[in-house]
Image (spheres, rainbow, N blue to C red):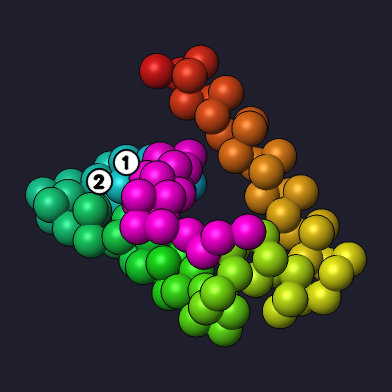
Amino acid sequence: MKALSRRQMLALMFVAMLSPFLRLIPRQVALFAGRAAWTAPFLAFVPLLLLAAALEKILKAAPKHGLGEASCQILGGGLGKAVLVIWSVWLCFHGGFILRSG
């Protein structure tokens, strides 16, 4: 399996940015902050940076492998596959949520 290309990484980050968690935080912060609501995008950016840092660390640990192989190599066979299954199921449900909610 090949390593993630730049296009694949950007697609993965785009899907992560659309997460319901990241979609709800700015709204709640804006409601709470009132006139200081302009700070909401900065708060939503923090979880995205953490996700990007985690993915970068995983991919640097196994530079010649893709995300799936790197996860299995770092976490072990069983746990790595379990994480990949959970990630895949999450992406399927999340994609359905995005399509349904518009």
Whole-percent x and y of residue 73?
A: 74, 76
- Residues at circles 1 and 2 in contact by the CB criterion of under 8 Å: yes
Amino acid type at circle 1 is Arg
**Image: 20 above or below 85:** above
Q: CA distance from mark 1 to mark 2?
A: 5 Å
Q: Quadrant of residue 47?
A: bottom left
| Magenta highlight on residue 5 | yes
List the residue tagged with mark 1.
27
Identify the secondary structure beneath mark 2: helix
Viewer-proximal residue, 73 or 50? 73
Q: Farthest residue toward the right?
A: 78
Q: Is residue 71 above or below residue 35?
A: below
Point out the residue furthest to the bottom here. 61
Magenta stretch, main secondary structure class = helix
| Residue for point 67% across, 43% down | 88
The kind of secondary structure element at disc 1 is helix
Give coordinates of residue 7: x percent, y percent.
Answer: 35, 50
* 98 sits to left or right of 26: right
Where is residue 72 shown, x and y percent of the image? 75, 69
Residue at the (59%, 69%) spot, across then down: 65
Q: Where is residue 17 shown, x and y percent of the image? A: 38, 47
The residue where tag 2 is placed is 30
Q: Give left or right: position of 7 versus 69.
A: left
> What span is colored magenta in the figure?
1-20
